[in-house]
Image (tube, grey):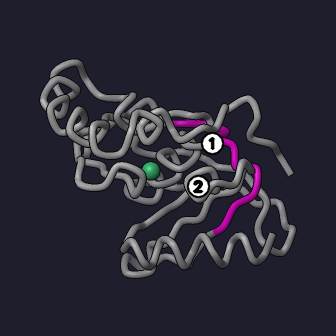
Amino acid sequence: MKSLIRDMFDTVDEASGIGLAAPQVGVSKRVIVVSLKEKGFERIALINPVIERMSVEKETIEEGCISIPGIRADVERPVSVIVRGITRSGRMVEIDARDLLARVFQHEIDHLNGTLFIDRLSAQERERIEPELAAFVQKQGAYAVSFEQHDPAKITSL
Ligand SMILES: [Zn+2]
């Protein structure tokens, strides 16, 4: 587990990303890492993360994803969430997250459920990125945007 988490942080760094879910590196486990060091947060790895609560208040922010490089689009999500999960050292934690941190948690936990940010776009936004997406699929194959070959039902808890 610790080496998986280390590998995931390495992958995030190499891609200059801010978060990653294990299925993105070919591992069907419910593990995410969040790396917002530059924004003043510690690096966080969570095992079996769950969103306990989300705010009614929402906001729209542009998102991208290491799995679909180059494509960015506006996504509406709750501003704050409470996330529960297990840390690397095996401690159960509950994190009250707002703004960017809340957003990264939601994006990464979505990955564990087989959802990409492009599945959460308004019809208008989806239409806007459609040509870029089509070009990406043509280059990488449809699997790349059907969330690799990971069936969410088969992504196991630990
Ligand atoms: Zn992503």
Along the horizontal axis of the image, is 94 left or right of 130? right
Vertical position of residue 26 compared to residue 17: above or below: above
Secondary element under disc 1, as helix, strand or loop, is helix
Vertical position of residue 103 compared to residue 19: above or below: above
Secondary element under disc 2, as helix, strand or loop, is strand
* Pointer 2 with pointer 1, Cβ within 8 A: yes
Quadrant the N terminus occupies: bottom right
Type of the residue with mark 1:
Leu
In the image, 70 versus 43, the foreground residue is 70
In the image, 13 versus 27, the foreground residue is 27
Q: Residues within 10 Å of mark 1 (few under 14, many from 20)?
A: many
Along the horizontal axis of the image, is 62 left or right of 94? left
Q: Is residue 53 magenta?
A: yes
Q: Residue at x 44, y 73 (%)?
A: 36
Total numbered labels: 2
Q: Residue at x 36, y 74 (%)?
A: 16
What predominant SS class does the magenta segment belong to?
strand
Q: Which residue is mark 2?
A: 21
Q: Residue at x 64, y 56 (%)?
A: 22
Where residue 155 appears, x then y in whole percent? 74, 40
Type of the residue with mark 2:
Ala
Where residue 112 appears, x then y in whole percent? 63, 42
The disc at residue 112 is 1
Please provide the residue range marked out in magenta.
45-54
Q: Residue at x 58, y 45 (%)?
A: 109
Q: Farthest residue in the top direction?
A: 123
The disc at residue 52 is none
